[in-house]
């Protein structure tokens, strides 16, 4: 399976023929087909037809709630690159087994996914079930509460994947719906829901950007030979996958050494729409080695370039020249090595609206993030080649003294990418705890019968046994 491609089940019509993009709303809801189609999704590698077996699980072992939640996640994914710093949210309205409304959140429209879906459903929302991957909001922000729109539409049941940890929501949305007499089922595909909104969850719980370390190395962990040759260690497919990663992030980070060695452009070349430009963040020391001739400086008026450095009165003239080319300069306190203090740098970036940061190199910057335990996720593209002694290590820094001090990844996957491999896993304790809790919730579902697979929500926040 290609990297970043996921096979998501799509519905087919009753006769087994695919009905992608068809209007599913029936003229007679009492005789409507029990299965319909979903709009194409960038997550899908291919359309895999599925049919229902009675009212329980389909042939893949999924329940109807789970399959429809997958469609909801599929919709939410379409907001990638279009919603930051807000969450990815999709919603379906289902009546008599037929999807009658769809929606996903995307900027610049402030309208939430649930409202889009309810608008499309119209009067068919009365007595229907609404699926949403994130708890509906219950407070006034840029829009009125989604809970009130759901109640007004006459929805009888809400099926959700995960709770919204935003302090303004965090169970209040579910409680409001319950108080209005709406049945609320939660924790449907909670692992998938957690992974989809990993950035938003870290933002809310840690109040800092989500940090994803991306590496491209040889089998022995080198990013260059002893002569400095590095282009290209991995193949074209892995490089394209790296570009796809960039599209989902607010900013990409490198150290000045990478700029000096490779003079990269650091742009999003996927061609996909994004509502905010990708910010290039360069970490530099008090010596300010970033040259005005670098691509990231010369193009700073077109593609934002930010320099994170340590205040140095001796280099004010150099910094002034960079600012004249459009580079924004951010000063933070120095760490013990005279480099920018990473926690302070992340706080500053978060205050500037950066919700996610893709760290691409080089060795020194990667090592600093690892040593500081500020990495949430790691993707390493491994080329099946060995560079050998003298090559540059992918990760520098102080490193671990004992095996107990190493940074261990959880929930890892390994996938082929052309002639290379992509290893991805989570590195932060927060993500490990979130995914462990999500797996526990998913396991509780699988212990139940097909018709009692979701947790009923109670106003106290403790799921009630639906059996």
Image (tube, rainbow, N blue to C red):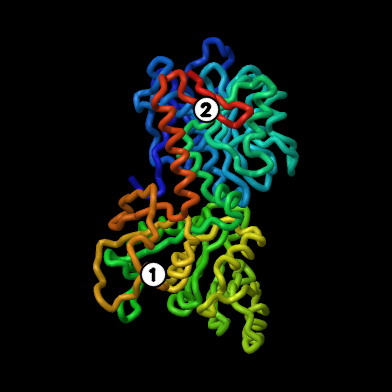
Disc number at residue 261? none
Q: CA distance from mark 2 to mark 1?
A: 55 Å
Circle 2 sits in a helix, a strand or a loop, which is it? loop
Taking the spot 64% from the left edge, 74% from the top edge, the residue there is 331
Furthest residue in direction top, as rendered: 30
Taking depth in this image into account, of 7 and 203 the one nearest to the observer is 203
Q: Position of residue 167 (x, y in %)?
A: 66, 44
Q: Is residue 26 left or right of residue 238?
A: right
Density class for disc 1 (Cα within 10 Å; few <14, some 14-19, many ≥20) is: some
- Tell me, yes or no, if residue 293 can be seen here: no
Q: Is residue 49 left or right of residue 460?
A: left
Q: Position of residue 465 (x, y in %)?
A: 50, 22
Q: Position of residue 401 (x, y in %)?
A: 36, 69
Taking depth in this image into account, of 358 and 198 the one nearest to the observer is 198
Q: Are marks 2 and 1 in contact (CB under 8 Å)?
A: no
- Looking at the figure, which quarter contains the N terminus? top left
- Whether 369 is drawn above or below 172: the answer is below
Of badges 2 and 1, nearer the viewer stands 1
- Whether 196 is drawn above or below 392: the answer is above
The residue indicated by pointer 2 is 22
Q: Position of residue 109 (x, y in %)?
A: 68, 44
The residue indicated by pointer 1 is 399
- Whether 270 is drawn above or below 50: the answer is below
Taking the spot 63% from the left edge, 30% from the top edge, the residue there is 174
Q: Earlier in the sequence, mark 2 or mark 1?
A: 2
Circle 1 sits in a helix, a strand or a loop, which is it? loop
Q: Is residue 132 left or right of residue 67?
A: right
Density class for disc 2 (Cα within 10 Å; few <14, some 14-19, many ≥20) is: few
- Tell me, yes or no, if residue 202 can be seen here: yes
The number of callouts visible is 2
Q: Image quadrant of residue 8?
A: top left
Taking the spot 65% from the left edge, 58% from the top edge, the residue there is 353
């Amino acid at each position: 399976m290609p990297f970043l491609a996921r096979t998501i089940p799509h519905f087919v019509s009753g006769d087994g023929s695919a009905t992608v993009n068809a209007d599913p709303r029936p003229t007679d809801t009492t005789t409507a087909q029990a299965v319909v189609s979903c709009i194409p999704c960038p997550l899908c590698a291919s359309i895999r037809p599925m049919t229902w077996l009675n009212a329980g699980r389909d042939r893949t072992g999924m329940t109807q709630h789970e399959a429809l939640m997958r469609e909801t996640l599929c919709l939410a994914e379409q907001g990638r690159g279009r919603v930051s710093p807000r969450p990815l949210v999709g919603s379906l309205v289902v009546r008599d087994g037929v999807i009658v409304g769809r929606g996903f959140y995307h900027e610049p429209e402030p309208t939430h996914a649930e409202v889009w879906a309810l608008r499309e459903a119209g009067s068919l929302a009365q007595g229907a079930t609404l699926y949403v991957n994130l708890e509906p909001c219950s407070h006034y922000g840029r829009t009125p509460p989604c809970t009130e729109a759901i109640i007004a539409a006459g929805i009888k049941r809400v099926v959700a994947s995960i709770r919204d940890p935003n302090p303004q929501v965090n169970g209040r949305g579910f409680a409001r719906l319950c108080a209005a007499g709406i049945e609320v089922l939660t924790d449907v595909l909670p692992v998938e829901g957690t992974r989809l909104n990993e950035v938003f969850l870290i933002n809310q719980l840690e109040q800092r950007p989500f940090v994803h370390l991306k590496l491209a190395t040889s089998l022995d962990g080198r990013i260059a030979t002893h002569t400095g040759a590095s282009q290209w260690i991995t193949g074209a497919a892995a490089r394209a996958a790296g570009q796809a990663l960039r599209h989902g992030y607010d900013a990409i980070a490198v150290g000045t050494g990478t700029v000096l060695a490779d003079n990269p452009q650091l742009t999003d070349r996927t061609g996909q729409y994004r509502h905010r430009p990708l910010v290039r963040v360069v970490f530099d020391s008090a010596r300010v080695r970033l040259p005005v001739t670098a691509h990231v400086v010369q193009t700073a008026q077109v593609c934002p370039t930010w320099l994170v450095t340590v205040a140095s009165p001796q280099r004010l003239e150099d910094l002034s020249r960079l600012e004249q080319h459009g580079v924004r300069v951010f000063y933070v306190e120095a760490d013990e090595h005279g480099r920018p203090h990473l926690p302070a740098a992340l706080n500053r970036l978060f205050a500037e609206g950066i919700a996610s940061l893709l760290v691409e190199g080089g060795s020194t910057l990667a090592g600093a993030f690892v040593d500081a335990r500020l990495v949430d996720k790691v993707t390493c593209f491994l080329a099946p080649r060995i560079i050998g002694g003298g090559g540059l290590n992918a990760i520098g820094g102080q490193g671990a003294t004992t095996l107990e001090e190493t940074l261990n990844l959880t929930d890892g996957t390994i996938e082929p990418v052309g002639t290379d491999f992509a290893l991805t896993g989570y590195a932060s304790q927060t993500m490990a705890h979130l995914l462990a809790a999500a797996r526990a919730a998913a396991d509780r579902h699988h212990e139940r019968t097909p018709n009692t697979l979701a947790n009923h929500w109670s106003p106290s926040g403790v799921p009630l046994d639906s059996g």
